[in-house]
Amino acid sequence: MTDHGAHILIDTVTHRYRAKSAVVLDAIRVEIQPGQALAIIGRSGCGKSTLLHIIAGLIRPAMGGIYVDGTRINGPSPKWIMMFQQPSLYPWMTVGQNVALGMKFAGTGYSKAKPRVEELLDLVHLGDYINTNVQDLSGGQQQRVALARSLCTSPEVLLLDEPFSALDAFTRAALRRDVRAIAKDLGITLVLVTHDIDEAVIMADRALVMDANPGRVRADTMIDLPDPRHPADPAVKAERERLMGLFEGTAGLAMDPIQTLPDDEIPDHAMPDTLPRAAGLT
Amino acid sequence: MTAPAVMMGPDGRSLTVIGLLRSPTLLRAAYPILGVSGLLGLWWLGGEVIAGNPDTAAFSDFAPGPAFAALGEMLLDGSILEAVVPSLLRVGLGLLWAIVIGLPLGILIGRVPAFRDATHIPFQFLRMVSPLSWMPIAVMTFNTWDAAIVFLITAAAIWPVTFATANGLRKVDPAWFKVARNLGARGWHMLMHIIMPAIAQDVLTGVRLALGVAWIVLVPAEYLGVTSGLGYAINDARDILEYDRLAALVVTIGVLGFALDSICLTLIRRYSWVRG
């Protein structure tokens, strides 16, 4: 696995969902260095998830563009891959088949992809589960499979859209640590969207704090901490306080655990927890 | 069909019989056997009543005894097979056309909202027209009776396939498409690796419903024109007053329909990934 991270340029992206609707993102211009781990922090409705979809090529911005290693992107690609809050594994495939899917789409058969699949499952600590039905896995294990699946096509960029928020605290902490370590190890550029300051402090080298209505970059700051980062470490705590200070200044809203703003208006972003069930006659 | 251990008399083996009766496998089999025995009993009773009344005694061959005897004969002389094979071919062809047309139609309805909105009223309208009402038009349109019958079966079977496919597709998690697109899936990949497995169970459930409807439409459709098939054989038996053969044909239709449905059920179980 000799992957390398890509350089990303978010070139003055402005976005609104319809021609006359409100501006969701207002002239965002950010440069991300290869291999950097960037956290985009903001409240619900600040357009951070929209921005991530735009970087992934899953949404076309109204104005501006995304450049990966200098090339303007015009659609999704397995080279810049996104992970969502829900793992969205395919229940009719085994763990191994799920992981191999990107290679299959690229024309590599399962038997040829298998060594890499095994390697990746070892990396996410699920080496023994290659033939397991994904419905038999816990939420955390499923998200690990989704991670392995994302890594299978040797991406240069990994985009995380609050991927751990549906998990319990222990699993979340383990995955934060592991994903950062894996991204650093492989040199992948990591862009992470979160409303959780802890997540940013543990996982990122740099944080963008975003304002809402319209979405703007309020602060752009480096998180200079040694690895591994532990939440109880005083240095980590200090960084957390500093980021919290920056965050509290956003959009003139006080820190309020109750989110009053609507969630990012992405039509198919909110996934149902339950899998679709057929109306069987059995 | 004979009744199981329940019927055994209280002899020296009674203890073992009680033991047997407590075995879960046997208990599970007991109720279906009871049901089938009940149906046979009612049939037999009906036969007795018909035979006992001088007005209806001519129809006494409807009873299980003569019917099973006739069924045995028909199995031996091959006349059952002669009736069954053309009917199965017609249903098979009709179902095939229903899937060939209904599956893409259902995918279009499920994936393209404009198509769904445009076709909703026309399709619901057509669906509610009894397929047999197309009979005169079918007869005029097609050169052969066979083709007309296949058309009628298709006209009946297409809607369950179409709507089950569309319904299955609309329930599919949109995130599956997003993830697949991100992983590099193009049109064909999306269809074969995501859409088809995701909706397989719904499609097969639709095919199962369609088969049921097709099997029902088959017999009346075969009353007209053709000189082969189960419907024809029933009409023929009635005309020559062979009620034992008629009853044997009814049994055959029921048993075959049940067998075909079981095949569908097996397929549904085979391709279902839904836990529950």
Image (cartoon, coloured by chain):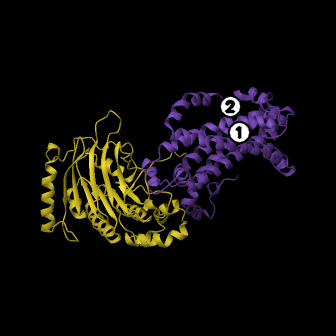
- The x and y percentages for residue A104 are 52, 62
**Mark 2 sits on what residue?**
B131
Number of the label disc, if any, that sits on residue B222: none
Instruction: Give the answer, above or below, for where B113 lies relative to B274.
Output: above
**Mark 1 sits on what residue?**
B45
Q: Residues within 10 Å of mark 1 (few under 14, many from 20)?
A: some
Q: Chain of mark 2?
A: B
Q: Residue furthest front?
A: A70
Q: Can the viewer see residue A252 in this picture?
A: yes
Q: Residues within 10 Å of mark 2 (few under 14, many from 20)?
A: many
Q: Quadrant of residue B193?
A: bottom right
CA gap, disc 1 to disc 2?
35 Å
Q: Give the side of residue A88 with respect to residue A259, left or right.
A: right
Of helix, strand and loop, which one carries label 2?
A: helix
Q: Colour of chain A?
A: yellow
The residue depicted at 45 percent of the width and 57 percent of the height is B183
